[in-house]
Image (cartoon, grey):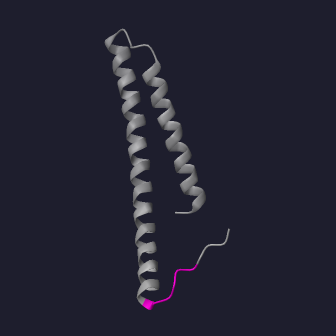
Amino acid sequence: MTRDEKLELIQRLLGLKHKLKVLDSMKTPDTHEELSTSLLSRWELEDELRAIEVLLDEERSINVKAKLAQVEAQFLSGKPMPKKKK
């Protein structure tokens, strides 16, 4: 997954969280029909939110494994970690 794709997913994730907060701040529905529609909408938003979180978690897991291999290789070779320039 590219950096731009990750950024788009994070932005969508933040948008979904905002939509859920807006739903929470709205007046409670008065009828069963309105309540069921609201509940279904909430579930759809939550499901998409979870799906995005799973994708990002998997991507981070892959990244952590790669970083772990890199750090282990550097320590096992006896070379010092390169310092990042500011």
Q: Residue at x 44, y 13 (%)?
A: 27
Q: Nearer the viewer, residue 76 or 4?
A: 76
- Considering every residue shown, the one lying at the far top of the view is 30
Residue reaching furthest to the right: 86
Magenta segment includes 81: yes
Residue at (49% x, 30% y) in the render: 19
Residue depicted at x 40% and y 48%: 51
Task: Name the image quarter holding residue 37.
Answer: top left
Start and end of the magenta stretch?
Answer: 77-82
Instruction: Name the residue rendered at 49%, 43% in the picture.
Output: 13
- Residue in front for this viewpoint, 42 or 77: 77
> Would you place residue 38 above or below residue 43 in this image?
above
Magenta stretch: helix, strand or loop mostly? loop
82 on left or right of 30: right
Q: Position of residue 74 (x, y in %)?
A: 47, 84
Task: Find the residue positioned furthest to the left.
Answer: 32
Q: Is residue 59 left or right of residue 35?
A: right
x, y percent for residue 79: 50, 88
Number of on-image labels: 0
Indicate yes or no whether the magenta region holds residue 63: no
**Residue nearest the viewer, comparing 13 with 78:** 78
Name the spot of residue 46 as percent of width and height, x first: 39, 37
Looking at the image, residue 55 lies above or below residue 43:
below
Res 82 → quadrant: bottom right
In the rendered view of the protein, which quadrant contains the C terminus? bottom right
